[in-house]
């Protein structure tokens, strides 16, 4: 990897980050900075000089978040210095500019101007699927068809949900998409109204960063039918149409899940999340360990092609029609 320089002066450690902060360099850079914190004479302030860093992907974001947590643990201060260009865009996209301490003189462009005047997808990509116009065209076409079907089913589903458990018809939740960008994901409500407040009462049957329980008592009778048939996920076609998601991708994590990620797990954010994908088709209900989700998400990234996307869409439809789903 690129050479990393460390300069200590007046209790401040200045660390020169490598030119590329991606998969190959991320872990080594994290270990080096973590070693500074582990010293008995650790400096009260560490400044990451990103002036030479021209590339950062999801793994690089994972390093920054991990070091931020270590700094808080040791009651130290972590500052990003000389941030500009593509790195600035990625940090802003993930919303980290709201929680990280960044030297205000280093921003070459205001974050809001960056996102208004140009799309990050046009200037930067972590995976070829991000810039594929054909994949986006398939997403739009599929989303329009899906929303048309949703519109036809909406009155019947809405009535069933309300009669079974009066309350909102839709459920929304903040999820994280490409490079950790936050968006509001929509579903038909399949749980009781106070489900979030009762979460502590339910045992998590998945080892790792996300929550699942096969016989979750918060799920309503209608909700179990919606989940079994995947009808609860139909409102997500709106997320696909907006571009937050794709028809096929990885599982969209919650911010709480990302907070538990180790650096390698951040690489699953290199593609957009999908309504369906490798883990949903291959092992949805048999998953009992979060590491298996990571493995399947990375497998999807490795095998991705437009043809493979269409194959997963076909397999998803076939499983639903043959009632082979057992989602929970």
Image (cartoon, rainbow, N blue to C red):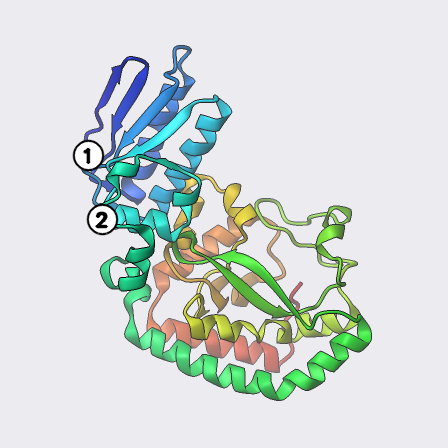
Q: Which residue is mark 1?
A: 2
Residue at left offset 19%, top offset 34%: 2
Nearest-to-viewer mark from 2 and 1? 2
Left or right position of 244 against 130: right
118 or 221: nearer the viewer: 118
Residue at left offset 43%, top offset 72%: 242
Number of the label disc, if any, that sits on residue 85? 2
Q: Residues within 10 Å of mark 1 (few under 14, many from 20)?
A: few
77 or 310: nearer the viewer: 77
Percent across and percent down for residue 43 are 36, 16
Q: Secondary structure at mark 2?
A: helix
Q: Quadrant of residue 122?
A: bottom left
Q: Quadrant of residue 297?
A: bottom left
Percent across and percent down for residue 1 are 22, 35
CA gap, disc 2 to disc 1?
19 Å
Residue at left offset 27%, top offset 63%: 117
Percent across and percent down for residue 34 are 39, 25
Q: Residues within 10 Å of mark 2 (few under 14, many from 20)?
A: some
Q: Secondary structure at mark 1?
A: loop
Residue at left offset 77%, top offset 75%: 162
Number of the label disc, if any, that sits on residue 177? none
Sequence-first tag of 2 and 1: 1
How many labels, in total? 2
């Amino acid at each position: 990897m690129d050479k990393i320089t460390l300069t200590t002066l007046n209790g401040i450690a200045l660390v020169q980050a490598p030119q590329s902060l991606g998969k190959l360099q991320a872990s080594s850079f994290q270990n080096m900075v973590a070693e500074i914190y582990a010293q008995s004479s650790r400096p009260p302030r560490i400044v990451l000089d990103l002036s030479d860093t021209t590339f950062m992907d999801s793994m690089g974001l994972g390093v920054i978040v991990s070091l931020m947590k270590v700094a808080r643990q040791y009651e130290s201060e972590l500052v990003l210095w000389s941030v500009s260009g593509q790195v600035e865009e990625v940090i802003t996209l993930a919303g980290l500019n709201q929680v990280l301490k960044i030297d205000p003189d280093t921003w070459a462009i205001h974050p809001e101007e960056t996102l208004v005047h140009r799309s990050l997808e046009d200037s930067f990509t972590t995976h070829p699927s991000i810039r594929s116009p054909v994949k986006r065209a398939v997403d739009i076409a599929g989303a329009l068809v899906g929303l048309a079907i949703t519109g036809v089913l909406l009155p019947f589903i809405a009535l069933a949900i309300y009669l079974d458990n009066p309350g909102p018809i839709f459920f929304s939740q903040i999820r994280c998409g490409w490079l950790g960008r936050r968006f509001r994901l929509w579903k038909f409500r399949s749980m009781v109204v106070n489900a979030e407040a009762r979460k502590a009462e339910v045992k998590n049957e998945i080892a790792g960063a996300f929550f699942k329980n096969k016989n979750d008592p918060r799920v309503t009778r209608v909700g179990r039918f919606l989940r079994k048939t995947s009808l609860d996920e139909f409102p997500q076609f709106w997320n696909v149409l907006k571009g937050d998601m794709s028809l096929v991708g990885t599982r969209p994590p919650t911010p709480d899940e990302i907070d538990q990620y180790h650096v390698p797990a951040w690489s699953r954010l290199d593609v957009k999340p999908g309504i369906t994908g490798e883990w949903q088709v291959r092992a949805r209900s048999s998953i009992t360990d979060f590491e298996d989700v990571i493995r399947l998400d990375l497998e999807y990234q490795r095998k991705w092609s437009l043809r493979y996307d269409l194959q997963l869409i076909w397999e998803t439809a076939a499983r639903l029609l043959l009632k082979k789903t057992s989602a929970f």
